[in-house]
Amino acid sequence: MNIEEFYEADPTRRSSDEENLGRDWLDDTGRRYELNWVVDTGELYLMAEPLEPVEMDPLGDSFVPDMPVELITVEILATITDRSELDSTLDGWSDAMEEPDGVGWVRRRLTAR
């Protein structure tokens, strides 16, 4: 689902605080993800977006154009309603994010719980 569909499916998501658990997760193909936890629903999700193209305006300034929401996808990995369980499940996440397949590390940790 895209990011708008994700938030529209449950209004609680839009009003909830979110904890960001890193913006530079890679899967085994090199695709980049952001990992987030929605406090009020307990949903741990991956958000993927294509690499933003950098464009030049007529004056030579660079800018990143707006990303269409349909290109920003969300995958809900798990529901973990307790913060201490989230912390113990993903203990060491900041180091794991730097691994070539950090997303695989997250999936293995969730499977083990």
Image (tube, rainbow, N blue to C red):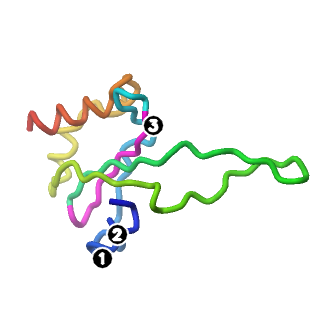
The quadrant of the image that shows the N terminus is bottom left
Answer with left or right where residue 36 lies relative to residue 24: left
Q: Which residue is mark 1?
A: 11
Residue depicted at x 91% and y 52%: 59
Given the image, on which type of amino acid does mark 2 rest?
A: Tyr
Q: Which residue is mark 2?
A: 7
Please determine whether, in this image, residue 65 is positioned above or below residue 87. Answer: below
Answer with left or right where residue 30 lies relative to residue 66: left
Q: Earlier in the sequence, mark 3 or mark 2?
A: 2
User: Label 3 near label 1: C-beta < 8 Å?
Assistant: no
Disc 2: CA contacts within 10 A as few (<14), some (14-19) or many (>=20): some
Q: Nearer the viewer, mark 3 or mark 2?
A: 2
Q: In terms of secondary structure, where does tag 3 sit?
A: loop
Please state which of residues 32 and 15 is positioned toward the viewer in this rendering.
32
Extreme-top residue of the structure: 100
Extreme-front residue of the structure: 70
Extreme-left residue of the structure: 113
Given the image, on which type of amino acid does mark 3 rest?
A: Asp
> What is the span of residues highlighted in magenta in the rendered image?
31-41
Please state which of residues 21 and 108 is positioned toward the viewer in this rendering.
108
Q: How many marks?
A: 3
Q: Which residue is mark 3?
A: 24
Percent from the top left, x then y, of residue 48?
41, 47
Answer with left or right where residue 70 lies relative to residue 40: right
User: Label 2 near label 3: C-beta < 8 Å?
Assistant: no
Disc 3: CA contacts within 10 A as few (<14), some (14-19) or many (>=20): some
Percent from the top left, x then y, of residue 14?
36, 71
User: Label 1 near label 2: C-beta < 8 Å?
Assistant: yes
Residue depicted at x 40% and y 68%: 4
Q: Main secondary structure of the magenta part?
A: strand
